[in-house]
Structure formats: structure tokens, C-alpha cells
Image (cartoon, helix red, strand yellow):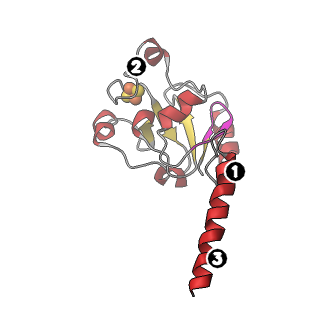
Amino acid sequence: MPVIRFVREGRDVECFPGENLRDVAVREGIQLYGLKGQLGNCGGCGQCSTCFVSVVDESGREALTARTPVEESKLRRRPEEWRLACQALVERSALVLTRPQVRLPDAEQRLEAARQAPLPEGPIAWPVPPGMEESDDELDELSEAITAKADEEA
Ligand code: FES
């Protein structure tokens, strides 16, 4: 499962494949918005252009879904690596700088350190919701029964 490294915040966050990048940040309490966006934003509709992020690792650019038509329009005059978090779905691990329009103290050192540290792989299995742990045992029993039945018939 993907891990998003939020460079400004110094945090690695696990997420589900296909999860919306803005939703991941909001869920984790990561501030995506500058002052303008904090005062008012579109809530993830791609209309306010305040949820900028920059994908700061070369391989990470393909870790998010391709730019949407909304982004192509809204990001015309912005760097190629910028995205609107609300329009991007996470497919693989990536390094992301929130609010790239805001100065990052010691930017070069922090970006280089973030690029050098290997990204953790993240969990390899979907989390089991609370109270559902027993169902795995039931599935295992069912799987064994099906295998045994198939062996009998062979
Ligand atoms: S939240 Fe408004 S454009 Fe992303």
C-alpha cells in the first residue's frame, strides 16, 4: 500500500490505493491550505485552486493519477510537478510538498533528505475493520472446506 511522505510536515502517511490525496491530508490533520484556502476553499471540487501540492520525487509523478482536465486548466501557468490535491488519486508511494507556494526553510536540505530516505513499503494487506477479525478464520475454514471438497472430487 502506498505511503505519502509529506516533506514540509516531516511525516510518512499510509493510505489506500485510489485514495484522494486531499482526503489523506485532511484525515491526517495535514494543512494543505495557505491563508486564502483556510479562509475559504471549495471543499475538494477543483474550483478554488488552493490545495496545491508539488510532487518532489521524479518517480512520484507517476504515483498519482494523471492530471485531470480541471488541473490542466487551473495549473496552466504553474510548474509541471504541481497538482491540485483534491484532483489526485494515490496509486503508489510519493514525496509531496504541501503549499509549494510558501517558502520552505532549508528547502534544499530537507528535500534532499526526504529523497534519500527510503520510503517504507506500507502495509501489504488491507486493514481488517474492528470486530471483523473472526471473519478471517471463517474464510480460512471455508477455503479449507472448498479445497478438501475439490480434492475429494478429483
Ligand atoms: S480544494 Fe478547491 S481546488 Fe482543491
Which comes sooner in the sequence, label 1 or label 3? Answer: 1
The stretch in magenta equals: 5-15
Q: Earlier in the sequence, mark 3 or mark 2?
A: 2
Is 37 in front, or is 25?
25
Q: Is residue 67 above or below residue 45?
A: below
Residue named by callout 2: 41
Q: Is residue 81 magenta?
A: no
Q: Which mark lies nearer to you, 1 or 3?
A: 3
Along the horizontal axis of the image, is 45 left or right of 22? left
Q: Is residue 67 above or below residue 6?
A: below
Amino acid bearing label 2: Asn
CB at disc 3 and ligand 1 closer than 8 Å: no
Measuring 63% from the left and 69% from the top, which residue is drawn there? Answer: 145
State whether residue 122 appears in this view.
no
Q: Secondary structure at mark 2?
A: loop
Q: Which residue is mark 3?
A: 148
Q: Is residue 8 magenta?
A: yes
Please, is residue 40 above or below residue 24 in the view? above
Q: What whole-number distance in Å separates the C-alpha atoms at marks 1 and 3?
A: 39 Å
Q: Amino acid at mark 3?
A: Ala
Give residue 120's mark. 1
Circle 3 packing at 10 Å, graded few (<14), some (14-19), many (20+), is few
